[in-house]
Amino acid sequence: MSSTSILIGIAGGTGSGKTSIANKLLEEYDKGDIIVIEQDAYYRDISHISLEERHLHNFDHPDAIDIELFNQQLISLLKGQMVEIPIYDFSTHSRLKDTKTVNPHRVIIVEGILTLHYYSLRELMDIKIFVDTPDDIRFIRRISRDIENRNRTVESVIEQYLKTVRPMHQQFVEPSKYFADIIIPEGSKNKVAIDLGVKGDYRVRKLKMIHGEDNFVATHKENGLTFVLDISKVYFSPRLSMERNRLSKLVSSGETVLDAFAGAAPFSVKLANQGAFVKSIDSNPDAENWARHNYKLNNISEQNFSFHCSNVEDYNFGNARFDRIIMNNPTNSLSYLPLLSALVKFNGHIHFYYIDSKEVDFNIESMLGDGFICTKVRKVHPYSPSALLKVFDIKRTKH
């Protein structure tokens, strides 16, 4: 399943502030670009039982949600199809005959206490957020909401909270926190931004700050190294830390390495720290500034690195040849393969990163000329529900 939409899941206990986070996101986008879909719309229809029995129903248990319909309609939206979302009446605890027509949007937010509980929903999400709020604050908010908006009495809210809400939170909601990519503590000053993907020639992330100070300079530490950069202005992926560590174990001191799409130079810094001589290239001037900062921050000798602000195709390599070439530009690497493969030495290596669709067979060896073999294919991480980021380790076997 391919999709151009971003699906964000927001979970947390009742009254935790999920809606406030969702509304903050709504403010950041044009109305036609974003929509919020509430889990509560998918309560199963229990109109076949008496109203007295409905009042006693456990609405905080996962079985109360029509997860089959919920999942099916989200998949349809991600495929670009219109859906008819149910409308739930909380005063009568029943599903209305009317429905709400929802069209596909660029950003889809799914909000509810159990949205991170269901595996099928989590698998569809690009970003998973959990709003972590103390029990007493949530309880006060629940009382106010149910009395004002759902025609409930104080006594009935308290009884329901003690009988079902609290135990279900402890059993199902709280444990789902550990599936979250981001946990937002109530009242914290943590900066939380939503990543809407890498865009443009500079592969810069489009970010929306939803919590905290509007400042995107971040510090990242991995394997004894420290990187500081403005993540809104330069490409950097913390998810590749294991991959950088893997390559550092393959490189030998004294090797010549070309980091062809360096960004803030995390690969370059890691390999130069191992004693390699690294040439870093990136067309983004901000990348050069942060890369040089990170080289200095990690005490890398100037003899071991050089950074060139240029497009790869415009750079004059002259007679330079390299023991190892890193091609970390997954959406565009393929077009550069003929140019860069000619720059690798005999018995040298290329590490080629590519987004491989699960729906299309991709054979790297058919893209290479005579004298190259693919020695290893490694799945780095999921890129989308229908694609994987893979790295192809390629060796030159002929002059």
Image (cartoon, helix red, strand yellow):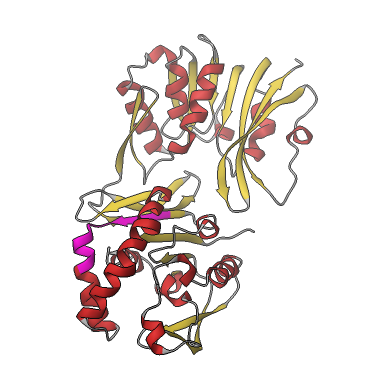
The answer to which of 397 and 72 lies nearer the viewer is: 72
Residue drawn at 32 percent across, 64 percent down? 18
The answer to which of 20 and 267 lies nearer the viewer is: 20
Q: In which quadrant will I find the C terminus?
A: top right
In the rendered view, would you say 151 is above or below 81? below
The question of residue 121 being in magenta is answered with no
The boundaries of the magenta stretch are 128-139
Image position of 232 (left or right of 213): right
The question of residue 138 being in magenta is answered with yes
Image position of 193 (left or right of 108): left
The answer to which of 220 and 120 lies nearer the viewer is: 120
In the rendered view, would you say 350 is above or below 274? below
In the rendered view, would you say 369 is above or below 189? above
Residue drawn at 30 percent across, 83 percent down? 150
Task: Tell me where residue 92 sits by quadrant.
Answer: bottom left
* Image position, residue 59 (x, y; %): 40, 73
Look at the image and tell me whether residue 36 can be seen.
no
* Image position, residue 194 (x, y; %): 38, 54
Task: Tell me where residue 230 sits by quadrant.
Answer: top left
Residue drawn at 64 percent across, 36 percent down? 336
Look at the image and tell me whether residue 388 can be seen.
yes
* Image position, residue 68 (x, y; %): 57, 69
* Image position, residue 176 (x, y; %): 41, 53
Q: In which quadrant will I find the N terminus?
A: bottom right
Query: Please, which residue is most extreme toward the top here?
Result: 254
Image position of 247 (left or right of 154): right
In the rendered view, would you say 217 is above or below 104? above
